[in-house]
Image (cartoon, grey):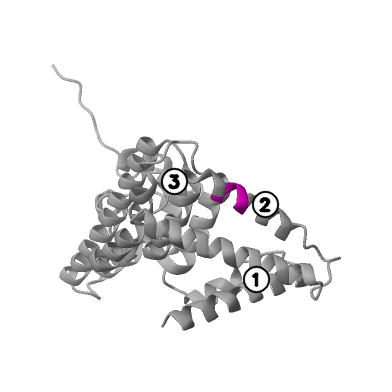
């Protein structure tokens, strides 16, 4: 003989939550947003859930597991919106999540292969630099690439990578770059922007730019850059955030440069612009 079990006519919120695989807090939220009608309360002032309430709650849990939003569930239950429209939008959302997940997995794999934060940058950048020894790139190099990628996108950072390849493989150029960086850092707020040494430093930095460009050409890295321009797939822009223009991004990235250092940078830019204009 099997014992006779009589199911309850109604259950309390804790039992309803346990059966549906959710929490009382979630059920209360469903009530608040109108997704689950709030049942009448018993003599003790507590809600009591009947068969129809539990059926609705089970369907809510199934739809949540499928990724359907609470707003869409409410529309589906009230027939205010075509379920096909809801499912179509859900399919688009899932496809976008899948693409994002694919990019995240690729980033994790690159990080595992490279073994340092370089793997967190876009694939274009990582591919250009992954052949270098692990200690060839400095944290400041990666910082510069991170900012460039944010402002100019993966292609811009991949082009800039040529500079760091040259610095990593030409100790003399790295030493000179370090010397110039230290001299520029010494241009603090106490330095006179019109001190002749500011202009001298700009000329030296200009010469370093030219030397780097020559080394890039000698190593054939400029040809690699051309191939990047030709093969770059615009679909890769999903790795960057394009909500703001490059100009906007530059104006939002702070650098604590003194007036003297800013003048040194401006003079260097003028020299480079003049040289390129003369070449053309």
Q: Is residue 136 left or right of residue 193?
A: left
Q: Which residue is mark 2?
A: 179
Q: For numbered disc 1, what is the local secondary structure? A: helix
> Which residue appears farthest toward the top when viewing the image?
1
The foreground one among 219 and 121 is: 219
Q: For numbered disc 2, what is the local secondary structure? A: helix
| Closer to viewer: mark 1 or mark 3 | 1
| Closer to viewer: mark 2 or mark 3 | 2
- For the residues labelled 1 and 2, the Cα–Cα distance comes to 16 Å
Please state, as top left, top right, bottom left or bottom right, where the N terminus lies in the image.
Answer: top left
Identify the mark nearer the N-term, 1 or 2.
Answer: 2
Q: Is residue 175 left or right of residue 129?
A: right
Identify the mark nearer the N-term, 1 or 3.
Answer: 3
Please state, as top left, top right, bottom left or bottom right, where the C terminus lies in the image.
Answer: bottom left
Rendered location of residue 126, percent (x, y): 37, 49
Rendered location of residue 232, percent (x, y): 27, 65
Rendered location of residue 167, percent (x, y): 50, 49
Q: Which residue is mark 3?
A: 118
Magenta stretch, main secondary structure, is helix
**Residue at 44% in and 46% down:** 118
Q: Is residue 28 left or right of residue 274?
A: left
Q: Is residue 185 left or right of residue 139?
A: right
Magenta residues (range): 173-177
Q: Label 3: how many residues lie within 10 Å, few (<14), some (14-19) or many (20+)?
A: many
Identify the mark nearer the N-term, 2 or 3.
Answer: 3
**Residue at 48% in and 68% down:** 151
Q: Which residue is mark 1?
A: 265
Q: Is residue 73 visible?
A: no
Above or below, 243 relative to 278: above
């Amino acid at each position: 003989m099997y014992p006779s079990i009589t199911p309850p006519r109604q259950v309390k919120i804790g039992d309803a939550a346990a059966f549906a695989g959710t929490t009382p807090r979630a059920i209360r939220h469903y009530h608040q947003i109108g997704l689950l009608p709030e049942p009448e309360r018993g003599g003790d002032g507590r809600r009591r859930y009947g068969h129809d309430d539990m059926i609705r709650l089970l369907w809510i849990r199934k739809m949540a597991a499928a990724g359907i939003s609470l707003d869409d569930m409410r529309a589906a239950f009230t027939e205010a919106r075509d379920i096909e429209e809801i499912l179509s939008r859900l399919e688009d959302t899932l496809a976008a999540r899948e693409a994002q997940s694919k990019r995240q997995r690729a980033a994790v794999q690159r990080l595992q292969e490279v073994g340092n934060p370089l793997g967190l940058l876009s694939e274009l950048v990582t591919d250009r630099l992954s052949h270098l020894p692990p200690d060839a790139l400095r944290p400041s190099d990666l910082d510069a690439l991170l900012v460039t990628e944010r402002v100019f996108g993966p292609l811009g950072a991949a082009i800039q990578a040529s500079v760091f390849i040259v610095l990593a493989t030409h100790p003399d150029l790295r030493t000179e770059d370090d010397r110039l960086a230290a001299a520029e850092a010494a241009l603090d707020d106490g330095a006179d922007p019109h001190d002749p040494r500011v202009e001298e430093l700009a000329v030296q930095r200009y010469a370093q730019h030219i030397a780097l460009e020559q080394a890039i050409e000698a190593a054939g890295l400029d040809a690699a850059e051309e191939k990047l321009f030709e093969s770059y797939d615009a679909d890769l822009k999903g790795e960057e955030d394009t909500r703001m223009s490059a100009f906007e991004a530059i104006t939002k990235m702070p650098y604590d440069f003194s007036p003297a250092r800013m003048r040194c940078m401006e003079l260097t830019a003028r020299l480079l612009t003049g040289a390129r204009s003369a070449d053309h």
